[in-house]
Image (cartoon, rainbow, N blue to C red):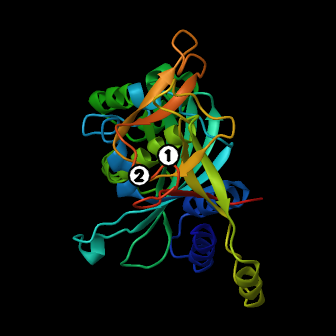
Amino acid sequence: MYAHTVIEDLTEFKKNNVIHDSAYSQGIDILIKGVRNSQQFHLGSFQELIVPLEKVFHEKSRPFWGPTSENVRLPYKECWFEFQNIAPDTPREEDVPKRAMLVTQMGIDLIWVWIVNWPKKTRRWLLSPQNYFITIGKKIGEHAPLREMVTAFLKNSNASPEVVKSYYESNIWPQPIIDKMDVKMSQDLCRDDLRDLVALNAAIMLLNCKNIVSEDVRPSSKINKKRRSKGKKPLYTYKILKLVLPSDTKNGAEYSKSGEKTRIHLCRGHFKNYTSDSPLFGKYTGLYWWEAHLRGDKKEGLVNKEYEISTKQH
């Protein structure tokens, strides 16, 4: 949904040489190439994504750490995640209603995140002046390759021993990609970008649940033909996120062979990880999303509101 306009805006931004910084310019090139090669997911609104997961992501939780670091694995090496941030009371100059991230799996315990946002004030997509290396469930001080990179950065920044320690104890390294960014500016921006990282963490955990699947909703071929004739990018196929429901919760609660699926609006719930020692219904293992109750009719697939996730088809 947003990817083609992100590429157009950043290409124009670089062409006009708005920021005279070679590292930032290279960052734009890396992002554009990554977006083109990635699988793209649309997450809907941040509020609809996070509210049902409030028991997992709360004020004291830490992205990609402890409970939020379990079962975190990208479905593809490079993924593009985008979402809306609905904040009607936010002043126009501070409102950023569209946000997106390019995420690369660098190893089993390391991901690399680039953030772009669309402020109402500029009405153009902008690349964040720093990207993020995130260790999954491990401190930076315990990840030798990343620790080495962070050490070099902090040495050049003349960081105090207290700041150095805080970086080693963290699992998120905000790496500046412009020359004029000191440690304080970097940390302030990291706090602003926390919402993006929480949304990313939640999305990846949901994508790793065995009882969450997605189904294609394909755009009209006539509409895409018309868009191409006008030189516009075609609309992408997107997927609706669905929960696979038990076929009979009263009689043994076993999943049906047909894999009955119901469009569902996620309600408050939590993740459950079933092992071979204690499998779900005596035979299912893995991560599952579990709700206190489900909104909608199991037979008819009625919903109060759809919860969607979309992906570009290659």
Residue 38: name its quadrant.
bottom right
Q: Nearer the viewer, residue 114 or 236?
A: 236
| Residue 176 seen in render | yes
Q: Which residue is mark 1?
A: 203
Q: Give coordinates of residue 210: x percent, y percent.
A: 59, 34
Q: Nearer the viewer, residue 88 or 101?
A: 88
Q: Relative to 201, is 2 on the left or the right?
A: right
Q: Measured along the vertical axis of the image, is residue 252 above or below residue 299?
A: above
Q: Measured along the vertical axis of the image, is residue 158 above or below residue 303?
A: above
Do the CB atoms of the residues marked 2 and 1 lie less than 8 Å apart? yes
Q: Relative to 313, is 308 on the left or the right?
A: left
Secondary structure, mark 1, is helix
Q: Residue at x 68, y 42 (%)?
A: 77
Q: Give coordinates of residue 156: x percent, y percent.
A: 44, 40
Q: Nearer the viewer, residue 282 or 1?
A: 282
**Numbered mark located on residue 38 in the image:** none
Q: Relative to 276, is 37 on the left or the right?
A: right
- Give the amino acid at mark 2: Leu
Q: Measured along the vertical axis of the image, is residue 189 above or below residue 9?
A: above
Instruction: Find the residue positioned furthest to the top.
Output: 277
User: Where, quadrant-wise, is the C terminus in this rendering?
Assistant: bottom right
Secondary structure, mark 2, is helix
User: Where, quadrant-wise, is the N terminus in this rendering?
Assistant: bottom right
Residue 34: name its quadrant.
bottom right
As measured in the structure, the alpha-carbon distance from the residue carrying label 2 to the one carrying label 1 is 8 Å
Q: Relative to 163, is 178 on the left or the right?
A: right
Q: Which residue is mark 2?
A: 49
